[in-house]
Amino acid sequence: MPDAVVVSRARRARARAVVVLVGALLAAVAPAPADRAAPAPPGPPAAASSTGTGTGAGAVGGVGAGVGASSTTHARIDLYQQAVAVLPDGARAEVPVAAVATYLPGTRVPDPAVAVLTAALGGTPTTTVPLGPRAARAAAAEQRAWLAAGTVPGDDGRYAGLARAALLDLHALTVDGVVVAGWSPHWRYVWPRDASFVAVALARTGRVADALALLDFLADVQEPDGSFEARYRPDGSGPPDDRGTQSDGTGWSMWAAGLVLAEVPAAERPAVAARLAPLVSRSAAHALTLVAGGLPPASPDYWEVAEHEVTLGTAAPLVAGLEQAAAVLSAADRPDDAARARAGAARARDAVVAAFGPGGYGRYPSRPVPDAASAFVLAPFWAQPPADGAAAWRASVPSMLRPAAGLAPGGAWRRDGVSWTPQTSLYAWVAAEQGDVATATRWLDVIDAHRTASGSIPEKLLADGAPAAVAPLAWSAACVLLALDALDGS
């Protein structure tokens, strides 16, 4: 029988579900009475029109205008999609915000029968791509097998659904072994930072091969001098624009390599370390050049705006990276290189503590405004956090807190009411690594409560809690998984 889209006789339970769905669809597509306006969303009025289309950065990009602004006008930003659907033959497609999204159980593969029915009733289906039942079932089986091949952190607790959704979304954002930051056009690139966090999340959930594939990609696109551009095309053909280099990528790549290596069985570690050594040795050489005088030169960091003064978001990842580079190079039987990385990490650490410590580990040495990069001097980033680092990190929260109970990237960020899930989930992970379960669950609850209709984690939360911008976002999904993994081990 050809793999045609047909609705065969179903089991009684499925039939009842379809009846319920039909009723819901009819209600959804029926026109509202002329004398009844659509209800306004909860929360403050939308006086601003910040569309968020920006310049297409990874997790915190496209934000040059308005950084540090004092306005308290709440932005209104569209949600660009509610998820990314997994289609047969490795294809992917955006799931429209208005879609009645229905997937085959335990996957991001659209249910083909429901998609046909939804379209026939005038609704928005999960996908308009014609799907044969047999091909859809095969794609679903493949995604379920990927999920079963590793662990699901927090699978026996209240965040099980959040964890499974985050894993499915990372898989949905993976094409040919490469994880893109998001699926909207301006996000469909690979940021070394985002990819590094995803690699660690994959490794710590039992998917080391996938993590190594990501690091192999970074090694392939890395510049000969060990530097990284801000972002890359997923086909490895280079950067999509002329943004230039971004120094934190050098630190993040080394940091991720060390944490991924730690998840490799001891017997296999020397071979994997040798595989990672070219990436790490080039990164370490470049990092040592950057910190030769103490602090590195100014560079864009995760805010992805031009800087004229070095930020903690650039300096701290280089320390973390050099520390992990020493471990990788030692395991690769390169003791001299390991010793140089270790000594460089110590010197850079001292410089960061001396410059940023007196101001409470704020964004700049000269202007110590609180910043989410204060998390980067703690575990799981620095092997030896500064004595006053944890207190400074906790003190950063009030100025970064936003109306939906999430966090902005820093105290100097524009006051538009928007919470950013990368920083909120980052703080959940760091809290979990410190053994602070209450704080970790506080931030996880914010993320869990404001996902899209498909369960994906959006980049942003508006003042009223509505999900906004791109969804899912790989960096946020990775941090959520890492937080849950740390809670499992606490």
Image: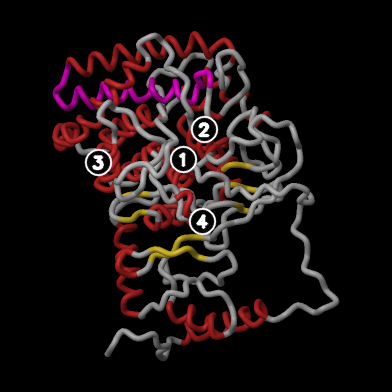
The secondary structure that most of the magenta stretch takes on is helix
* Amino acid type, label 3: Asp
Dot placed on the residue nearer the N-terminal end, 2 or 4: 2
Q: Position of residue 6 (x, y in %)?
A: 40, 88
Query: Alpha carbon of mark 4 to alpha carbon of mark 3: how far?
Result: 27 Å
Query: Alpha carbon of mark 1 to alpha carbon of mark 4: how far?
Result: 17 Å
Judged from the image, the secondary structure of the residue bearing numbered disc 3 is helix
Task: Quarter of the image for the N terminus: give it.
Answer: bottom left
When the figure is inspected, residue 135 is found, relative to residue 450, above or below; the finding is below
* Amino acid type, label 4: Ser
- Identify the residue position indicated by label 4 in the image: 456
Task: Quarter of the image for the C terminus: give it.
Answer: top left
Which circle, 4 or 3, is nearer the viewer? 3
* Amino acid type, label 2: Ala
- Categorize mark 1 by other alpha carbons within 10 Å: few (<14), some (14-19), many (20+): many
Which circle, 2 or 4, is nearer the viewer? 4
- Identify the residue position indicated by label 3 in the image: 216
Q: Position of residue 249 (x, y in %)?
A: 38, 31
Q: Is residue 47 left or right of residue 155?
A: right
- Identify the residue position indicated by label 2 in the image: 431
Judged from the image, the secondary structure of the residue bearing numbered disc 2 is helix
The residue shown at (79%, 51%) is 45
- Identify the residue position indicated by label 1 in the image: 483
Q: Which residues are magenta?
A: 308-335
State the count of labels: 4
